[in-house]
Amino acid sequence: MKFNKIGFAAAILCLLLLSQTSSSASVTINASNGLSIVSSDSLEITPFENTISESSLSVIEHELVVPQGLGTVVIVVESSLYSSVSAAVTQYRQDLNDTGYHTILYTNPISTAEELKANLSGWYDSEDILGAVLIGRLPYAQYYHPAAGAFSAETFICDLFLTDLDGTWSDTNPTDGIYDAHSSTTGTDIFPEIFLGRIDPTCLTWGTSVANHVNTYLARIHSYRIGGVSRNRQALFYIDDDWSGYWGTRWSNDGGLAYSLVTSVNLPTTSTTASDWLNTRITQNYQWGHLCVHSSPTTHYFGPGGSGEGTVTSSQIQAAPPSFNFYNLFCCSGAKWTIADDLGVTYTFSGSYSLATIGSSKTGSMMDCDEFYGPVGQNLTLGESLRDWFSESLTSSSSAGSSYLEWYYGMNIIGDPLLSINYDTTVRTPTISSVSHPDSAIWYNNPRPQINWTVPPEVNEIAGYYYIVDQNSTTIPDSATGTYTTTNGTLSTEDLTSETWYYHVVAIDSVGNIGDEAAHYSVNIDNDLPEITLMEPIVNGVSVTISWNVSDATSGCDVSRLYLDGTLNATSSTANTTIEVNDLSYGQHVFNVTVYDMANNTASVGIIVTLVQPFPDILLLITVGAIVGLVVVVIILSRRRR
């Protein structure tokens, strides 16, 4: 097929160019060494705010708590470099922390790629890390691909070894410290579990020192995260002759998944040359550049078959300098970062705007670009996007598919893998509390809550807040619906009615980003008195039966108490209560019923009952006899007068 012919020609030409310009750097890896896993138990646990003296050459720090985090990432710094870059690394960690990441910093010496992978595997198992950032020259693995089909034999740097944590890697034919087999078993795969990026300017022959390059770079990505070094939100796809037409158009369209404005320089409509790329294109105001051209680790070769339209060297690029933020190099071995003045490293560390380069350390580069630019367009980080691309691009539904697996083994990120094309758009969620209504499960009779919230960590600093108070538990305030304040709290100036109220708060940062997740806090207010109905008492001698009903429409009744002559007599927690009080003395008694609702509002009602002592039977007989006798006397006297 035409596609395979193009791939074969490109692969052969890239290998020829490599053989003319440089040889592979040699490093010995003892594949038989045992793996040394660093568990989280061996980490020195220290608060992030602790400082480290410049004399400390190695330190392990563990950021303990980052609420509502995006995940855990590990920062591994070359031990001998750390003291010279510690201040910049501290700021970098703070930026990641403020963005929502939990970070682990590791600066102990690491001798082999196997040791580094063992540490990454240990952190993946214990901390569930998303990925790693390697600062300085840290160990790497090499891999050997034998000739197969359109692909020639090649030995190259393979960072996939560090990111595929469950695959099986072997060094058997011959046993020479270079891996030559990669496979999976049941329950495992050959895809990366984590992402990885290298901030390593060691290969550069210009500049004052590696430490100065690292410090300058970390300052630049800090500026990017707070709105600096910004470029126009557009992408340039520059497709040289051998990929023009179908693939050039397709890849440019794939770029549309991330950018609404894509400029495609692609034959036959536009000529691509070395002079045009160097003198016109790379100094333009684009955020993203995607370059497809034959290359070696240090030189681009323009024209059909890599000749006829000029060359661009890494030294020329550094002098230009490039002005994009991000570069995707479809350039064979353009990201072979161990070679002096490698193209990918040069793009990343040159100029005032460059942030990261995606490329390959071997023949081949990225196919099925839609699987990469889709996640990029969703503002996933470069690391997440490349990690997902590796597995998704090998599916049967992809255009290139698994037949191009060998092209992908050298893919890597030169720069910070935690960058995304929208710098910092996240605003963390505050945490709400109340000194007046501290427990959302309890009812209170104070109708004016005092609400406070924390100032969330933020790269761009918090400028203010939008809040809403309503009866909906899921409301998210915004600039149109919320009340704006620069203070982290509010006190109700009017009485809230008796019901459950919800406070909703989002933060806004200094560049205008508004949190898309609100903090919610409920307060239960009941300022109404409970109701009580006292029935007519029933008197039976020296016993009195008292009955009452209680109700509370808001918080509900808690308890009712019967007081007899000021002393507690009985307690009830039911709505309808009947109590018989016995053995009362004759005379006046005061019965009082007091009910308490769940907000401690009270209502009382009372009644006076007088018990009259009855006459005894003997007194009644005497009284009746006296009356009868008196009547008889009156009658007798009356007859005598006649």
Image (cartoon, rainbow, N blue to C red):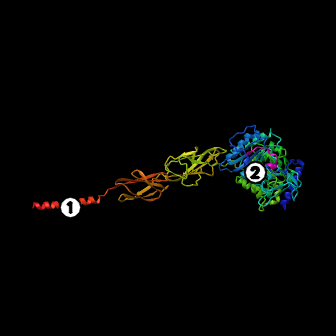
| Horizontal relation, residue 472 to residue 623: left or right | right
Looking at the picture, how far across and down is residue 74, in whole percent?
A: 74, 48
Amino acid at pointer 2: Gly
Instruction: Name the residue carrying label 1.
Output: 628
Q: 634 and 346: which one is in front?
A: 634
| Magenta-colored stretch includes residue 505 | no
Q: What crowding class fits label 1: few (fewer than 14 Cα within 10 Å), some (14-19), or many (20 or more)?
A: few
Residue 285 can be seen, yes or no: no
Q: Position of residue 280 (x, y in %)?
A: 79, 46
Q: Are marks 1 and 2 in contact (CB under 8 Å)?
A: no
Is residue 580 visible in the rendered image? The answer is yes
- Quadrant position of the N terminus in the picture: bottom right
Q: Mark 2 points at which residue?
A: 122
Residue sitting nearer the eye, 313 or 21: 21
Of residue 384 and residue 349, the one placed in the foreground of this image is 384
Q: Bounds of the magenta span?
A: 105-115
Q: Which amino acid does label 1 sit on?
A: Val
Which comes sooner in the sequence, label 1 or label 2? Answer: 2
Place residue 166 in its image quadrant.
bottom right
Look at discs 1 and 2 and give the one toward the viewer.
Answer: 1
